[in-house]
Image: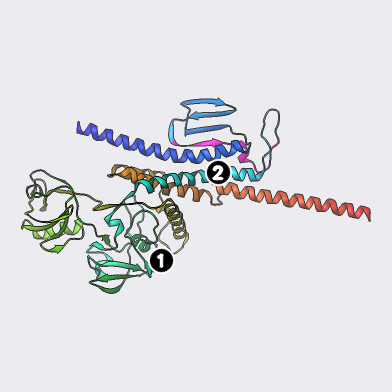
């Protein structure tokens, strides 16, 4: 029964992902559709989804249809495929349309995407977006013992201030990326980077040579990294019955602040401490709501396990607070992220390439991960802001398949037509002058 419930839950999440992704694409196409109708262009078809039609109906010369492949939609506007105006004929009936109207129709798709981004941003502003502790900090919570940071002398608990002189205020996360540690390390182009940090009240600087993993989880070359992870207090998501943690009286949402008086910065660090101490008793400093408790617990080796443990499932978000960024801040952050990413991809020295950008599958995966997380629908709203900004900005680039490519083509066409008309007028005037003299 539990398997059926989980399967149904997964199916529901997948349905939510498909619906919101399709909604975003269809709103973009509606921008083209309404503008085309407003400007007098002939519209043949407006389709929600692709493939053979499950349903269709023609109204006022437009075929409205529902396809069978849930991957967006499209609007068919014959006038948009031609640079030169096409005169109306008794059978073909393509109206004459100026290039400026075509430009407006092409621009309306990105415009609708941007307007939808504002709608989602207003919802995020009103409802809030969950921010995990690891996203908001620049304190190091774990260091790969074989990584560059460990070799350079970086310690757990160090607070990073800047990378190559660029101030950082977050480790990673959503929104504007140029103030994050992960982005500044990945974006760096020099063989070594300078890490400025604070340790025990003293400012220190270290030169580190980042490494690039050969492949990531998607089989692609990874980003430059230095082998550190953010600080994040271990927060209990669940406890196994009759486990050491259960017997010691620990509860869900308890946060482990210290072990035997030593401050704990991450789940990984706590796991290492337990592994080293084995089944020896531990004195945990626990934060429970507004209270701080001392709890004694003795790890044990559970059946099927090889290492001692407490019998706890950890919340991978750590402590969470809610942020309410204004719609303008969200849109600006989205545009800046698109720009920073494109500049990194365009740079010859950068390790960030086209293969690192998320395509259709990557975007769907991000939505899925958002929905399955606690309060994930709030993260999905924020992701929708970022995606709509991406769709709006990228479609304005003057590349032929994109809306911006069509706009640039018709702008050039309009300029050429005006130049030709001016030249013809000048020739006519010159001819008249020569005849009269």
Which SS class for mark 1? loop
Q: Which colour scheme is used?
A: rainbow
Magenta-colored stretch includes residue 49: no
Name the side, left or right, on which 118 lies relative to 94.
Answer: left
Q: For the residues carrying marks 2 and 1, which lies nearer the camera in this image?
A: 2
**Residue at point 50% right, 29% down?**
65
Q: Residue 432 carries which label?
A: none
Residue 169: give x, y in percent of width and height. Answer: 34, 62
User: Cα distance, mark 2 to mark 1?
Assistant: 38 Å
Q: Mark 1 points at which residue?
A: 189
Q: Which of 198 and 64 is in front in this view?
A: 198
**Residue at point 61% right, 40% down?**
81
Q: In which quarter of the image is the N terminus?
A: top left
Name the side, left or right, on which 61 lies relative to 353.
Answer: right
Looking at the image, residue 155 lies above or below residue 108:
below
Binning the other alpha carbons within 10 Å of mark 1 as few (below 14), some (14 to 19) or many (20 upward) gives some
Residue 186 in view (yes/no): yes
Q: In which quarter of the image is the C terminus?
A: bottom right
Residue 431: give x, y in percent of width and height. Answer: 87, 52
Magenta-colored stretch includes residue 75: yes
Boundaries of the magenta span: 71-87
Q: Mark 2 points at which residue?
A: 108
Residue 435: give x, y in percent of width and height. Answer: 92, 52
Residue 427: give x, y in percent of width and height. Answer: 83, 52
Q: Which of 397 and 211 is in front in this view?
A: 397
Name the side, left or right, on which 281 lies relative to 228.
Answer: left
Which SS class for mark 2? helix
**Residue at point 36% right, 56% down?**
221
């Amino acid at each position: 029964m539990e398997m059926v419930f989980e399967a149904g839950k997964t199916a529901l999440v997948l349905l939510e992902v498909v619906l919101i992704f399709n909604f975003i694409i269809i709103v973009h196409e509606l921008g083209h559709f309404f503008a085309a109708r407003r400007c007098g262009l002939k519209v043949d078809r407006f389709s929600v989804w692709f493939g053979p039609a499950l349903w269709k109906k023609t109204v006022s010369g437009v075929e409205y249809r529902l396809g069978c492949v849930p991957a967006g939609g499209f609007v068919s506007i014959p006038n948009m495929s031609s640079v030169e105006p096409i005169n109306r004929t008794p059978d073909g009936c393509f109206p004459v349309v100026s290039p400026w109207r075509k430009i407006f129709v092409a621009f309306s798709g990105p415009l609708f995407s941007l307007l939808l981004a504002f709608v989602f941003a207003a919802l995020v502003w009103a409802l809030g977006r969950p921010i995990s502790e690891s996203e908001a900090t620049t304190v190091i919570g774990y260091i790969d013992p074989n990584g560059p940071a460990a070799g350079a002398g970086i310690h757990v608990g160090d607070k990073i201030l800047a990378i190559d002189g660029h101030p950082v205020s977050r480790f990673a996360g959503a929104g504007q990326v140029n103030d994050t540690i992960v982005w500044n390390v990945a974006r760096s182009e020099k063989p070594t980077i300078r890490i400025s940090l604070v340790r025990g009240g003293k400012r220190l600087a270290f030169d580190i040579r980042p490494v690039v993993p050969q492949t990531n989880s998607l089989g692609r070359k990874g980003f430059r990294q230095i082998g550190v992870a953010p600080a994040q207090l271990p927060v209990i998501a669940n406890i196994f019955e009759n486990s050491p943690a259960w017997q010691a009286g620990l509860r869900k949402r308890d946060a482990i602040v210290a072990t035997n008086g030593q401050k704990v910065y991450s789940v990984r660090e706590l796991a290492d401490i337990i592994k080293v101490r084995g089944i020896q008793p531990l004195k945990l400093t626990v934060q429970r709501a507004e209270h701080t408790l001392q709890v004694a617990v003795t790890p044990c080796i559970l059946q099927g396990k090889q290492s001692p443990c407490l019998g706890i499932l950890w919340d991978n978000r750590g402590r969470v607070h809610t942020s309410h960024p204004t719609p303008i801040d969200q849109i600006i952050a989205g545009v800046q992220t698109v720009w920073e990413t494109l500049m990194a991809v365009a740079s010859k020295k950068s390790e960030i390439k086209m293969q690192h950008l998320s395509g259709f599958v990557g975007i769907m995966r991000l939505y899925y991960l958002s929905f399955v997380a606690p309060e994930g629908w709030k993260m999905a709203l924020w992701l929708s802001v970022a995606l709509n900004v991406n769709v709006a900005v990228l479609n304005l680039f003057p590349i032929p398949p994109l809306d911006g490519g069509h706009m640039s083509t018709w702008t050039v066409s309009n300029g050429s037509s005006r130049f030709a008309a001016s030249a013809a007028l000048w020739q006519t005037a010159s001819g008249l002058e020569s005849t009269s003299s």
